[in-house]
Amino acid sequence: MKCLELVRTQLEQEGIDALLVESPTNRRYITNFTGTAGAALITAHDAFFVTDFRYVEQAKSQCEDFTVVQHENEMSKEINKLFKTENVSSVGFEKAYTTYEKYERYQEAFDVKLVPVAGIIENLRLFKSNDELKTMQKAADIADAAFEHIVTYIKPGIREREIANELEFFMRNLGAEASSFDIIVASGERGARPHGVASNKQVENGDMITMDFGAYYEGYCSDMTRTVAVGEPSDELQHVYDTVLKAQLKSLEHIKAGMTGIEADAIARDYIYAEGYEGYFGHGLGHGLGMDVHEEPRLSPKGNLQLEPGMVVTVEPGIYLPGKGGVRIEDDIVITEDGNERLTLSDKSLKRIEP
């Protein structure tokens, strides 16, 4: 497995004998295991997956490149046995995932040197293979279909939470395992809250509604946002919508490999600020997307990482006016050799829902 060889190369460079992987996302990425209990141990020459009786058969079918080891009592004791049989004297553990309590348990159970590491598997996850991109395209297709459906469902009097529930139900019916995150539905004045998770507020005539949602499909996320109007929005919010849309289109036109996340963010930010909305676009332009809904690279004023082909990111400028409402428009794109390609394809002209 190419990923295992890349991990081993990194371990050699770090001077570590083995890597212990327990975080659910990294574990699934490196092993294909979809259960909830187990740890992967990768050494210079072998790879083991340690789990309990409940998951042994599942692990044997999913973890093709790993020797499956069943632990009877504490998993840490079984892992320590492997350290001895494999002559492991130092092991890297995921410092971003490991709590101090777990670290203390490691110290008590393991007769090896513990080395905190970060990025070994996350750096592999930055670049999506063709198979991963096919899965992510399916997740995006499900979100697109959900948006097409939901605009026929919205009407005055409906509650934000009903819209969110309908989106999730529809996406699950199309094959999603779940929504990628708690669905955001923010209508009227609540549209000024960038992460306004759906509430019991009723939709009213004249409201703008921002909906941020995505499908979690076969281990990968989509993440899109569309803002619609019920009836006629105010002239001010119409202008906000036009400004956000132009900023998003400019970003999609110019984002490419070789630029940093800072440079990508500036495309939209400079335009929005020039239109008089400085201080009303308070988040980054976007973020990496994959097995987690928020990954590297970051498109923000702090996003130093350079964009490269195979990375998938969101592009989501927004303007939020306290007491009035807000607009955000978001697509998922893959960085290519000569620019980028959209995964989410829903129409972005302002949809007006008849009251």
Image (spheres, rainbow, N blue to C red):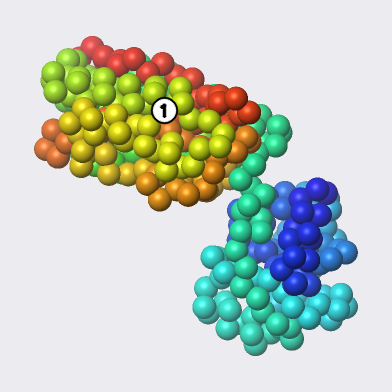
User: Looking at this view, is 177 or 127 the one in front?
Assistant: 127
Q: Is residue 86 left or right of residue 51?
A: right
Q: Which residue is drawn at 76% across and 50% down?
A: 3
The 10 Å Cα crowd at callout 1, few under 14, some 14 to 19, many 20 or more, is many
Q: Is residue 210 left or right of residue 147?
A: left
User: Looking at this view, is 78 or 335 the one in front?
Assistant: 335
* Position in image of residue 58 (x %, y %): 76, 52
In which image quadrant can residue 197 be found? top left
Q: Can residue 83 be seen in this view?
A: yes
346 relative to 225, above or below: above
Q: Which residue is drawn at 78% across and 66% down?
A: 12
Furthest-top residue in view?
354
* Position in image of residue 209 (x %, y %): 26, 28
How many marks are shown on the rendered structure? 1
User: Looking at this view, is 310 or 293 the one in front?
Assistant: 310
In which image quadrant can residue 175 be found? top right
The residue to which callout 1 is attached is: 251
250 relative to 129, above or below: above
Q: Which residue is drawn at 49% across and 42% down?
A: 260
* Position in image of residue 275 (x %, y %): 21, 27
Residue type beneath disc 1: Ser
Is label 1 in a helix, a strand or a loop? helix
Q: Residue at x 70, y 37 (%)?
A: 129
Quadrant (top left, top right, bottom left, bottom right) of the C terminus:
top left
In which image quadrant can residue 208 be found? top left
* Position in image of residue 84 (x %, y %): 84, 81
Q: Is residue 286 visible?
A: no
